Image: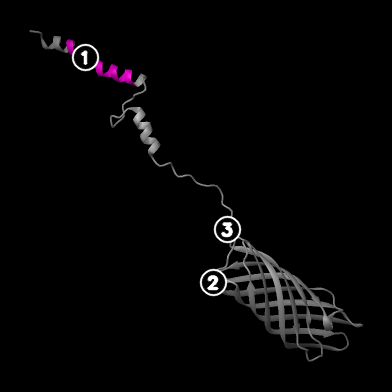
Amino acid sequence: MPSPRMRSATLLPLAFVPLAACATATRSGFRSTPAGLPAANLVAARAAEPAEASFPGPVAPAPRRIDIGTSYTIAKLGLFQPSGDLDDLDEGSAIEVLFGRRLLSFLAVEGSLGYLEADGRRGSREFDLWAVPVFLNARASLPILFFEPYGGIGIGGLYADYKEQGQFDSNDFVLAGSAFVGLEFGLGRLAVGAEYKYLVTEDTKDDFAIEGSVVSLFMSLPF
C-alpha cells in the first residue's frame, strides 16, 4: 500500500490540470468571469448596459420671455430734443427708471420716474431747464421669437425748474402726456432695446409748454 507521502506526490501533478486549462482558455479568448461566463458573453452584457451620462457643453441662453403676472424694471439713458415753445434750445440728456407688470401676454402697465435737462437760447435770451417727469403707462407689445416691438401711451405730470435771462427764475408742476414706440431684444433673462418717446405738457404759469422727443437705449430685467 502506498504511503501518504507517495499519494501526495502522485496527486500533486493533478493539481496543475485546472490551472493549465484556465491558462489555455485565457489564451483562446474565453477568460472566466466571476459569474462563470466566458468573456464573449461579458462583452455582450456590457454592451446592453446603459451608456454613461455625458455632460453637454455650454448652452446658449433661451430667448427672454415675460410671463403673465411677471414684474420687471427698466433703466433708460437717452437724449432730449426740445421742440415747440423750446425749439431753440440745444439737445439735452434724459434718464428714466421704470417699473412694470405684465397683465396679459401683450399688455402691461408701467410707472416711471425720470429726469431731463436742456439749455440754450430762447429767442435772444439764455434759457435753462431741468425737469422730473412722472408717468403711468399702458404698453402693448407683440412677442416674436427673441425680439418684441411695442408701443404705448402715458399720462402723468412734470415738475420743472427753469429760468430765462432777465425774465423769470421759477418752477412749476404741470400735467403731461407721452406716446412711445420701441423694440426690445431678449438675451436670456436680460433684455436690451431702443425707444422713441414724444412728451408734451400743458402751459406753465409762464406761458410755455415743455415739449420734445426722447431717444433712448435701455436695459430690462424681470423680477
Side of 156 relative to 56 (left or right): right
Residue 164: x and y, percent?
85, 85
Residue 77: x and y, percent?
72, 69
> Residue 14 got which mark?
1
Q: Nearer the viewer, mark 1 or mark 2?
A: 2
Instruction: In this rendered view, identify the residue nearer to me: 28 or 219.
Output: 28
* Above-or-below relation of 166 to 5: below
The magenta stretch spans residue 17: yes
| Cα gap from disc 1 to disc 3, whole angstroms | 72 Å
* Above-or-below relation of 38 to 105: above
Residue 97: x and y, percent?
66, 73
Q: Residue at x 27, y 18 (%)?
A: 19
Residue 10: x and y, percent?
17, 10
Q: Amino acid at mark 1?
A: Leu
Q: Nearer the viewer, mark 1 or mark 3?
A: 3
Q: Quadrant of residue 53?
A: top left
Q: Amino acid at mark 2?
A: Ile
* Residue sitting farthest toward the left: 1
Secondary structure of the residue carrying numbered label 2: loop
Q: Which sits earlier in the primary sequence, circle 1 or circle 3? A: 1
The stretch in magenta equals: 10-25
Q: Which residue is mark 2?
A: 68
Instruction: In this rendered view, identify the residue nearer to me: 98 or 170.
Output: 98
Q: Which residue is mark 3?
A: 62
Q: Amino acid at mark 3?
A: Ala
Near mark 2 (Cα within 10 A), the count class, few <14, some 14-19 or many ≥20, is: some
Tell me the quadrant of the picture where the C terminus can be found. Answer: bottom right
